[in-house]
Image (tube, rainbow, N blue to C red):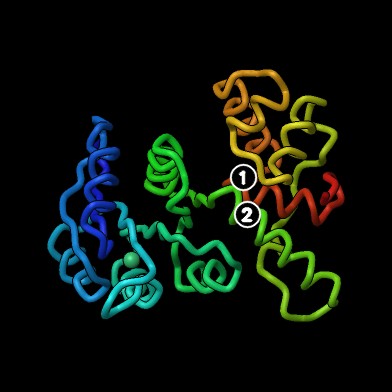
Amino acid sequence: MTTKIVIIDDHQLFREGVKRILDFENSFDVVAEGDDGSEAMGLVETHRPDVVIMDINMPNTNGVEATRLLTEKYPESKVIILSIHDDENYVTHALKTGASGYLLKEMDADALVEAVKVVADGGSYLHPKVTHNLVNEYRRLASEGTNNRSTYMQVEIRRPLHLLTRRECEVLQLLADGKSNRGIGEALYISEKTVKNHVSNILQKMNVNDRTQAVVVAIKNGWVEVR
Ligand SMILES: [Mg+2]
């Protein structure tokens, strides 16, 4: 199965860099590129990609607006925002419009590839720093006791924490600290591959779709320290 990808970014050099990274994967096919949000609809209509990689700041139609239009009309094409902005205003706005992923331009190539795979597979993917900011925002809302709570709070817990091994609990804590797989591997002196196995076991046991949900559920239930 080939994952068809469209890239929308106003910086040509950056776009080419992203394309080169993605083309390196056999299962990925970058089918089109555009340099403004206004082009996104036409390109998606023509190519019906599985994933659209979308910049935010562009000259005419920005990426958040383009994402809103796209996800309404073509829900089967998943959008990953790739931006320099990591503050929670941008992030929550982008997620509300239906983006499935939020990445930062400072990320490494492996994470980009992983994100596209996860999102193409129906999951969601946030840069660890973005997750960390969202967690802070969640704490702020929770401590204010407002009714304006995020839907993450309604995530149903079907499996108790005691199903997690001690090592999985350590990994969960490091996820909550905003660490990447590599960072977790370094902290626990284990390989990134082992970290990935632990993370997928945690997700399965907690019955959640992605690491962000796992962190939010864990915080909500007091299974991890927010530090
Ligand atoms: Mg831009």
Query: As rendered, which of 29 and 180 lies closer to the eye?
Result: 180
Which residue has dot 2 on it? 131
Residue lying at 76% horizontally and 42% vertically, measured from the top left = 159
Which residue has dot 1 on it? 211
The quarter of the picture where residue 35 lies is: bottom left
Query: As rendered, which of 32 and 129 lies closer to the eye?
Result: 129
Query: As rendered, which of 121 and 138 lies closer to the eye?
Result: 138
Relative vertical location of residue 116 with respect to residue 165 in this rendering, above or below: below
Could you tell me if the residues under marks 2 and 1 are in contact, i.e. CB atoms within 8 Å? Answer: yes
Residue lying at 58% horizontally and 30% vertically, measured from the top left = 182
How packed is label 1: few (under 14 Cα within 10 Å), some, or many (20 or more)?
many
Left/right placement of residue 153 relative to residue 107 reads: right
Residue lying at 44% horizontally and 63% vertically, measured from the top left = 99
Three-letter amino acid code at the position of disc 2: Thr
Which circle's residue, 2 or 1, is located before the other in the chain?
A: 2
Relative vertical location of residue 134 with respect to residue 106 in this rendering, above or below: below
